[in-house]
Image (cartoon, rainbow, N blue to C red):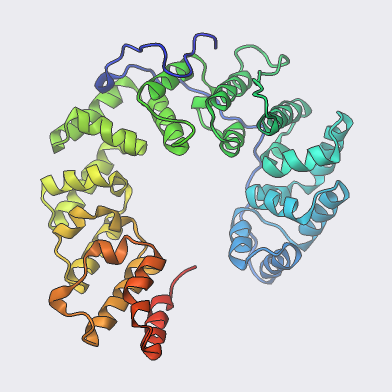
Amino acid sequence: MSSLKLHGRRRLFFDLPNLRFSLQNASPFSSATAATVSPRKGQNFTVSVAYLVESLGFTTKLADSISKKVSFNKDNIDSVLNLFRTHGFTDSHISNIITVYPQVLIIADSLAPKLEFLKSRGASASELTEVLSKVPKILGSRRDKALSRYYDFAKEIVQADKSSTFKKLHPSSLLPQGSQQENKIRNISVLRELGVPQKLLFSLLTSHVQFVCGKDKFEESLNKVLEMGFDPTTTTLRFVDALRILYALSDTTMKARVEVYNRLGFTVVDVWTIFKKWPTFLSYSDKNIADSVKTFLEIGFSRDEFVMIVKRFPQCLGYSAEMVKKKAEFLVKEMNWPLKTVVSNPSVLGRSMEKRIVPRCNVIKCLMSKGLIRSEQLPSIHSVLICTDQAFLSKYVMKHDDDKQLVAEMMAIFTRGRVK
């Protein structure tokens, strides 16, 4: 990939509103996946979840989440724990492996041969535990060649990040030239050189995402993302989202999407400014956009207010109509904040009703009922819902610390029913 300009030193001649690129099909990385089995029901299921909590110290919530992804029982857990422990893995390593890749609980029979195979190739116990605890999905590889290939590359990334001297990574010479595996490793090497964090590189290595399997299209899309100013080191997730979307959308789809936003009142500059803020903005379908417009208009916002809300908080386009209406209705009808305050502070639509909006508003209503806040002096929506918990409590609760009973009452209201 010698032609790739990693830091935007080459001027790229393309018109942002009319980006030209074609959709390229790429087969998924199938060798690093394992089938997910629906969880078992009944007493055995409950016992298995409890045993996972007991054996590895998982929270009940985490154990239950894992149980919804794969079916396992006490024997599965014991088998996996014993196997990993005999190969030098600590409980911390094992916990991370099961959390990230719970499928190990249903491929226990194939784990031993894979671990022995890696050891036979010279992997030490410390190397095995470090690499596999960071990227356990490698254990889903079905063939020795695939296992070797992805293990070696993951090990290179770990060692490169630990070394004080920059080390350039290269695709394995054993990979067929032009293969999707070679493309994936080469592309991830480029992303590593650009400073994309190790954790995300591992995620991409074992993922099904199309853009890391491409070649010319990957280079083209990456150059465009860099030219647009996305920084892979400081805005990593936005950088990857932008790369994924520019890779996936055809020229026709992109032009049509921009035209839809134009008709709603967004300028071309608006569209690309919002894209840089929230790349997923361009992935919403015409139906998603139309439904979102309908929702906001039904609530009582004007089209201009809708445009302003999206400019300030584009994430709201992905919210369900039910969620947006429920939150807007609560803020306006329950708290008497004017609808225009949501236009000024649209990020409140992204706050949790259970964790933030309801508890904090109940505290404010408590203070109002006691005459400590007059209705005509209702605090701003920003000061109530946008600040941190600590700032909120300091401003509205702890200022009354001379009245211990009142503070206790408000703290009970603040914490009641909150989902942690």
Q: Is residue 323 above or below residue 121?
A: below
- Name the side, left or right, on which 87 lies relative to 318: right
Q: Quadrant of residue 413?
A: bottom left
The residue located at (27%, 30%) in the rendering is: 272
Q: Nearer the viewer, residue 96 or 162?
A: 162
Q: Position of residue 335 (x, y in %)?
A: 21, 72
Q: Position of residue 175 (x, y in %)?
A: 69, 16
The residue located at (63%, 19%) in the rendering is: 182
Q: Nearer the viewer, residue 169 or 17?
A: 169
Q: Position of residue 73 (x, y in %)?
A: 74, 61
- As drawn, which residue projects farthest toward the top? 3
Can residue 99 be seen?
Answer: yes
- As drawn, which residue projects farthest toward the front? 402
Q: Position of residue 389 (x, y in %)?
A: 40, 66
The residue located at (23%, 29%) in the rendering is: 258
- How many numbered marks does the figure carry? 0
Q: Quadrant of residue 42?
A: bottom right
Q: Nearer the viewer, residue 279 or 213?
A: 279
Can residue 282 be seen?
Answer: no
Q: Is residue 341 above or below residue 3?
A: below
Q: Is residue 9 above or below residue 400?
A: above
Picture quarter with the N terminus: top right
Q: Quadrant of residue 23?
A: top left
